[in-house]
Amino acid sequence: MLIDSHAHVQVRQFNSDRPEVIAAAFAEGIGRMIVPGIEVESSREAVALAAAYPGRIFAGVGTHPHDADTLTPDALAAQRELAGSPGVVAIGEIGLDYYRNLSPQDTQRGALISQFALARELDLPVILHNRDSHADMIAHLRQHGAGLRGVFHCFIGDKSMARDALDLGFYLSFAGPVAFPRNTELAEVAAWAPLDRILVETDSPYLAPPPFRGKRNEPRHVALVAARIAEARGLTLDALADATTRNATALFRLPPLDPQEDTSFHAPV
C-alpha cells in the first residue's frame, strides 16, 4: 500500500471526474490520501471528502501563503472549528512562498505564526509549503514552533536544507520533481535522508512525474514518485511503500485500516 500524503483532489481541476480519479487511485493500491486545504472553503471541501471516504481520505485544514491575506480572525476561527471535524489530521497547507509573493511577506509570516499556534493548541501536525523562504521558515520554526511536528511537503532543497528540517524533527515529503531527469541532486537527497523520515506525495493536480509531465497529476501517480526513490535507494518498490506508509501513519496518527478494505499495492507497468 502507498499513501499519497498530499493531494488536492478537492480543487476545480477534478470537478468533472473526482470520484473516478479517487477510485482509480484506490484500485491501484493507493490505500489512503491526505487532502490539504488552501483556505477556508477548500478546507471545508477537504473535510467533506474525508466524511465521504472515512478511513481512506483524511483532511488538512489551513491557509496557504498565497491566500494569507484571507486569514482574518473570522477565517481562523472557522479553521479551528473545521479542525475538530472527523478525519482532520493536520493543519495545512501553510507556509511561506517568496517566489510568487501573492500575499505580502509580512502577512505570510503572521498567518504562519497564527497557524503554528492553532496546530499546537489542537495537537495536530503541520504541512509546510516552503518556497524560496527557507531561512525565514527555519527561523520561525525555531522561534515559534516549539513542540510542533510536521512535514516539509514537496521538498526540493539540498542536503543542507534537508538537514535543517530533519534536525527540527520534521519529515520530508517528495513529489513529482524527484523523478524529473534533471533533478539528480534531489534524488540524491531522497536517497540520503533517513528512511523513517520520508513521505511520498503527488501534490495533485500539479507537478506530474514523467511520463505524465505537463498533464494533470493524480494520486495514482504517487507510485511513480515512490519508484524513483526506491531506485535511488536501492530498495524494492514494496519496501519503499511499506516504509513511507508507516511514516505517514505515524506522523498523521492515522487509525488502523479496515481489514476488509483491499489496499494491496499494484506496481505500475
Image: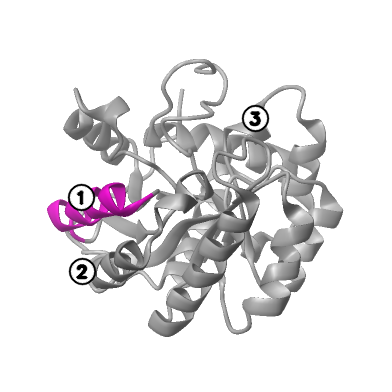
Amino acid type shown at disc 3: Ala
Mark earlier in primary sequence (1, 3) = 1
Dot 3: element: helix
Q: Which secondary structure is most common in the magenta stretch? A: helix
Please tell me how crowded label 1 is: few (under 14), some (14-19), or many (20+) other residues with Cα within 10 Å: some
Badge 2 crowding class, 10 Å Cα cut-off, few under 14, some 14 to 19, many 20 or more, is: some
Q: Which residues are magenta?
A: 39-54
Residue named by callout 2: 86
- How far apart are the two marked residues, 1 and 2, measured between alpha carbons? 11 Å
User: Residue at left 19%, top 22%?
Assistant: 16
Task: Residue at the far left: name it.
Answer: 52
Which disc, if any, is residue 179? Answer: 3
The residue identified by callout 1 is 49
Mark 3 or mark 2: which comes first in sequence? Answer: 2
> Dot 1: what SS?
helix
Q: Quadrant of residue 217?
A: top left
Assess whether mark 3 and mark 1 are in contact (beta carbons under 8 angstroms): no
Residue 152 drawn above or below residue 11 = below
Residue 148 horizontal side relative to residue 118, left or right: right
Taking depth in this image into account, of 219 and 146 the one nearest to the observer is 146
Counting from the top left corner in percent of width and height, residue 123 is at 43, 81
Q: Earlier in the sequence, mark 1 or mark 2?
A: 1
- For the residues bearing labels 1 and 2, Cβ distance under 8 angstroms: no
